[in-house]
Image: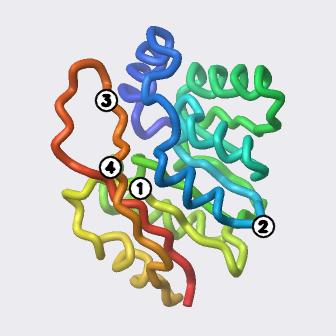
Amino acid sequence: MTDAHPEAEHSFDNTYTDNEAMFGKSYQELQTYFSSFSDKGAVLDLGCGQGRDAIFLASVGYQVTAADSSGVGVEQMLKQADLQNLNITGVTQDILSIQTEEKFDVILLDMVLHSFEEEQQAELLQKYTKNLKDDGFFCIIFPDDIANDYFIKMFNSQAENWFIKDEIIIDDIPRVGEEVIDFTFVMQCVKRS
């Protein structure tokens, strides 16, 4: 496997080894949003880290496949899933190189997409569009210093038309150590028109 971010993978492996709950639990806003759906479908959680979103989504009935380049993070997620008797498929691989034909109702990119260069962001969105069911949606979470129309413009540069189905401001930001939080996150759910 070729890793586009070898330093990040190594650093997260070490960080996750030292702190098994690095980013805490899933955001309250994400929990409320995904709990509101009566039909729980299949979710692909890309850049899952230690699995905080995957664990929550599986606990409320979603079928979850979660991928990250950190083997330590994926192992920690699977250990927690086992302790809670949850069925999660864990994949240790860089999200740029995963090959799958499986279709999902939701593709989740929680605080990961903006860490790639613009060309790679577009490549990832185009790549995983083929894995989205016709009525499915992408859920992208990113810091509020990125323009609200940034990712929707990227989607709409493809052949299909997309729209922002829902947009939620996330104030429930995890603190790491003594970190000062002076921003919020945006959660956008994007669908084909």
Q: Amino acid at mark 4?
A: Asp
| Badge 3: residue crowd in 10 Å (few <14, some 14–19, many ≥20) | few
> Which element type, helix, strand or loop, lies under badge 3?
loop
Name the residue located 77 percent from the left edge and 20 percent from the top edge: 83
Q: Position of residue 48 (x, y in %)?
A: 55, 39
**Disc 4 to disc 3, C-alpha distance:** 11 Å
Earlier sequence position, callout 3 versus callout 1: 1
Query: Which circle's residue, 2 or 3, is located before the other in the chain?
Result: 2
Task: Report the residue marked by disc 4.
Answer: 171
Residue beneath disc 2 = 39
| Marked residue nearer the N-terminal end (4 or 2) | 2
The amino acid pointed to by label 3 is: Arg
Given the image, on which type of amino acid does mark 1 rest? Ile
Q: Residue at x 41, y 70 (%)?
A: 167
Q: Nearer the viewer, residue 123 or 152?
A: 152
Q: Decide which of tag 2 and tag 1 comes sooner along the chain.
A: 2
Out of 51 and 120, give the one closest to the viewer. 51
Above/below status of 191 relative to 58: below
Quarter of the image that includes the N terminus = top right
> On screen, 101 above or below 8?
below
Question: Which numbered disc, 2 or 1, marks the residue closer to the eye?
Answer: 2
Q: CA distance from mark 1 to mark 4?
A: 12 Å
Tell me how far mark 2 sits from mark 1, CA to CA: 22 Å
Instruction: Relative to 143, say whether 167 is above or below.
Output: below
Disc ID at residue 141:
1
**Quick one: SS at disc 1?**
strand
> Mark 1 or mark 4: which comes first in sequence?
1
* Proximity of marks 3 and 1: CB atoms separated by less than 8 Å: no
| Residues at marks 4 and 2, CA–CA distance in whole angstroms | 26 Å
Say which residue label 3 marks.
175
In the picture, residue 92 is in which quadrant? top right
